[in-house]
Image: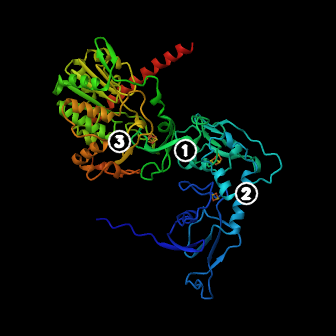
Amino acid sequence: MADPAPSPQMLNVQIDGVWHEFPKGTRVIEACEQAGSFVPRYCYHKKLSSPGNCRMCLIEMGFPRLGPDRKPELGPDNKPIINWMPRPQISCAQDIAEGMGVRTNSPLVKECERGVLEFLLINHPLDCPICDQAGECQLQEFSVDFGMSKSRFLENKVKKPKNVVLGPRVTLDDERCILCSRCIRFCQEVAHDDVLGFVNRGSHTELTAHPGKRLENNYSLNTVDICPVGALTSTDFRFKMRVWFLKETKSICTSCGTGCNTIIGAREDVIYRQTPRENDHVNCCWMCDYGRLNFKYLEAENRLLEPQVRFGEKLIPTDWSTAIAQAAQQLKEFSGSEIAIVASGRMTNEELWLISQLAKSLGAQWIDIVPRREPGDDILLSEDRNSNTNGARLILESKSEPGANLLTIAEAVKSGRIKALAVLGENPMHLGIAEAELAQLPVLILMDILSNEATEKASAVLPGCGFAEKRGSMITCKGRLQRLNRAVRPPGNARDDWEILRDLLQAIGGGDSLSSLEDVFRRISETVSQFDGLTLSKIGDLGVHILKIEELPPVHPGDQEAIAKAVALQARRRAVRRQVDDARKAAVTQ
Ligand code: SF4
Ligand code: SF4
Ligand code: FES
């Protein structure tokens, strides 16, 4: 067994008259917070460098008084007597030291806080009633907690540019900027895109993009999150909703294998924004713009709202029990190599487990998921755009890599060997099967949230839920099991996918005693060793690591080739789809 990590050296620090112990290397501002003495801050962000430029975190600091023997003199409490420095110090750019003394609530500190806030507010516009940051603005909050109740400033405020388009997703109001430089440092240190900087001097200093550059990297919206005031706003979210009306739900992003932790902000079943939630095991405090804004499709016009079954040439809306009974009846007419199930790598573990049971009950020989690969980056974005490929690997117990059988399934559909195809959570048009070939299938069961060209060919259509409309668990590309939570209700008569699959399984003749998602998870933990001893509630808000990636069987070169071909085919189909969409849009606007 490896030696345990050595415990860090502990240092004694006196904060507001009380002695505490902290590990060596702790920032003074963090030590104060841990001791229950919050120090206001603007430029300091624990995941960025500390330039110490806003001066909001001033404190009184001192060090042990040394006696003639150069040893700290001790007071009646047997602790060092502190020699206080005559001037206040910033607490964000300095680590603690042995015997250090800190005062966060002395008259001098209070006077400094009021003074710094008065300076910061001198040129700040009276925008709060129309500012998107209202409700989560640190300038408002610290003004109330640490500032003065009135202004002594009589001169005209400096005017600066408003409504500046910094990039496709971020809008700047320079008058509100308090020049903390968090956004500049984020772009340099995290996004590796040195795009922002300050120009001009004194009261006229402005934030701007460097000449010829735009704030358009895939992480640009994180600057909006960390801007302590309303200077940087999300172009998508601004003026849409007051933040105090938003119901916040802790969840995860399902747009790639990283699984960034998120907070979904919704009101009356409409999602207004997604923001990152801190999890140092997964995404630190950040998320990419692509994942953050990838929720609009939940309200697309082609959302499936009712279960439908085929009646002659037409699909007709029906109730759930009829749709499930008909789908089950049709599937039961075939068996073995005549049935194929294509699932999605964006499904939850619970859904995938129910699909595996469905396949077992039907004796279906073919089962796979649709791979989704696109270029990633070395920050967060994974090249695997499926959020639960590892869950599919574990639960479907396929002998080949997820996605490797897809082209074989498509070939078998074309040749007529497969008679019943269930496509769950995916668009069958991406499998490389033409519409006419889908139309030839005696049974085509579709479960999805959006309609597409294939929907009209289905024998039963089962409308499911989007990522923000359901609960469940997924495993990230690094092997962390995390929970997905429901933020909004699904529209129309759409149902949670696990319930649809459970009902289908029961109609086929299995899945008894599964009355809740927790029951399904329990079954997984009983059958998949990596889930042993876990429950949905034990996963917690930050997830648990269950999988060492090196434990997975190595990818077979043949599998890799098959997956690459399937992905290339999807890319071609998407390109054609885009062309058709563009042509339609152009025709509408003419
Ligand atoms: S725009 Fe916001 S984050 Fe950037 S320097 Fe100004 S106040 Fe700070
Ligand atoms: S990196 Fe992946 S998981 Fe994170 S926000 Fe982007 S798409 Fe979502
Ligand atoms: S937070 Fe310390 S100087 Fe800004």
Q: Give the spatial CA distance, label 2 vs label 3.
A: 48 Å
Left of 211 or right of it: where is 585?
left
Please state which amino acid type lies under the numbered disc 2. Met
| Within-10-Å neighbours for mark 2: few <14, some 14–19, many 20+ | some
- Residue at 32%, 28% in the rendered image: 566
Task: Note whether ligand 2 is within 8 Å of mark 3.
Answer: no
Q: Quadrant of residue 307?
A: top left
In the rendering, at what x and y percent does residue 77 appear? 56, 83
| Picture layout, residue 362 above or below residue 517 | above
| Picture layout, residue 233 above or below residue 34 | above
Question: Considering the image in quadrants, where does the N terminus appear?
Answer: bottom left
Left of 405 or right of it: where is 192?
right
Q: Give the spatial CA distance, label 1 vs label 3.
A: 27 Å
In the foreground, 77 or 266 = 266
Q: How many marks?
A: 3
Left of 293 or right of it: where is 563?
left
Q: Nearer the viewer, mark 2 or mark 1?
A: 2
Q: Quadrant of residue 61?
A: bottom right
In the rendering, at what x and y percent does residue 336 appear? 16, 27
- Residue at 53%, 48% in the rendered image: 190
First-in-chain label (2 vs 3): 2
Inspect this view and state whether residue 131 appears: yes
Q: Give the spatial CA distance, label 2 vs label 1.
A: 31 Å
Which residue is under mark 3? 472
Which residue is under mark 2? 148
Please state which amino acid type lies under the numbered disc 3. Gly
Please state which amino acid type lies under the numbered disc 1. Asn
Q: Quadrant of residue 166?
A: top right
Which residue is under mark 1? 222
Task: Note whether ligand 2 is within 8 Å of mark 1.
Answer: no
Q: Nearer the viewer, mark 1 or mark 3?
A: 3
Q: What is the number of the mark on residue 200? A: none
